Image (cartoon, rainbow, N blue to C red):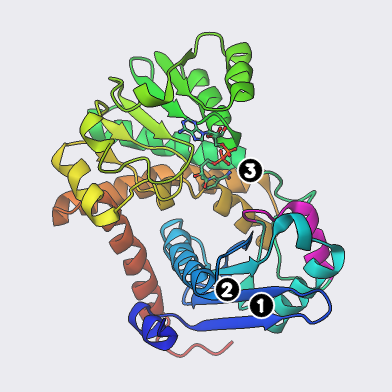
Amino acid sequence: MKKFDYMEKHGYEQLVFFYDKTTGLRGITCVHNTTLGPALGGTRLWNYDNEEDATLDVLRLARGMTYKAAAAGLNLGGGKTVLIGDADKVKSEAYFRALGRYVQTLNGRYITAEDINTATKDMDFVNMETDHVVGLAGKSGNPSPKTAKGAFHGIRASLMEKYGSDDMRDKTFMVQGAGQTGDYLIGYLLEAGAKKVYFSEINDKHIKKINEKYPDVEFVKPDDVYGLKVDVYAPCALGASINDDTIDQLQCAIVAGTANNVLSDEAKHGQMLKDKDILYAPDFVINAGGLINVYHEIKGYNEVAALRDIEKIYDRLMDIYKIAKEDDIHTQEAAKRFAKRRIEIINKMRANYVKR
Ligand code: NAD
């Protein structure tokens, strides 16, 4: 790939390759945009087929983080690290300390955290070599309940937009995936008095867990999810659940959940949902609760303050829905406009000289 052309096209700032000769660590850090603040994004460890795939992944993920942080109202930019390797073989104290040393060389322009195949205990090793790491044990804790809480507020906002009321007592919900976030989301919906909650799962242990915990929550077979007539379909499993095969089956009024990259093709399926009059809560806005929570670690963690900021997802989605209506565009596009506008306006606002 022509890296500089790609960086120029999408406004990237920095792409750093690093190799540690002692541990064999091979990694790439990408800083997409730091207009709003330091670039934050987790470290993903993955056995990529080749360097090209790893590079494209880190570029794509870092850019996604810029929009996510901007739309969440955080003073953060977008960044990401990918490590190329087999998670079952490469992990060690020295491996992650070596990563920490490379993170430190960026001098706070980039802050890392856990992601796929990296965990809190790995970040403890990273933290031995750099201060620029969040998601540490004993601080903001597991992000999943906070991500689910943010999605819950986002669902409330979506109900308000669609029906003029965010009361859940006469509404029905389908939660797809009862893992770390789906399980909490089901709990929050029930607490709010949801009329009926369905769930779907492919993992028998998780099916058993939900059946025991919430006997009134009804299991639906994975293939029957899309055709179920409910008010809200909440994707909380894998990405790309809205695709060419599923979109025609949808019987819901709203798509709003915790999953990343819900739309298989953003432009195409975003528009198709709009055409079907199904309200789509943009994934990177509604699932930002975990990011907002971890952001508070940088400022000195305070759960009450974090939860207050997570609740703001409600108002942010209402603003995005307004843009979508005014500009007659689909909501995913509106969310990107919303994020870009914030970056542009804060950039302009800072143009005058202030002595510090
Ligand atoms: P998880 O792995 O804990 O849970 C996902 C669950 O979905 C699993 O129990 C899995 O068995 C189930 N599943 C997989 N395919 C399914 C299918 N076809 N039908 C029904 N169930 C299926 O993951 P999670 O942490 O809850 O994350 C869920 C989604 O939310 C992911 O897309 C993730 O990227 C996104 N997300 C999570 C967080 C977080 O804080 N955990 C933050 C932002 C975004």
211 displayed left or right of 11: right
As rendered, which of 283 and 310 lies closer to the eye? 283
Confirm or reject: label 3 Cβ below 8 Å from ligand 1.
Answer: no
**Residue drawn at 62 percent across, 82 percent down:** 17
- Label 3, secondary structure: give it: helix
Q: Can you say whether 83 is above or below 20 in the image? A: above
Hey, what amino acid is under mark 3? Val
Q: Residue at x 58, y 27 (%)?
A: 203
Q: Residue 46 in magenta?
A: no
Label 1 crowd (10 A; few <14 / some 14-19 / many >=20): some
Q: Disc 1 residue type?
A: Gly
Label 1–label 2 contact, CB within 8 A: yes
Q: CA distance from mark 1 to mark 2?
A: 7 Å
Measured from the top left, where is residue 49 in percent x and y? 55, 66
Residue 287 place in picture, x, y as percent: 47, 46
Relative image position of residue 117 (x, y in whole percent): 67, 54
Q: Is residue 192 visible?
A: yes
Q: Residue at x 42, y 52 (%)?
A: 284
Q: Which mark is residue 108?
A: 1
Q: Quadrant of the C terminus?
A: bottom right
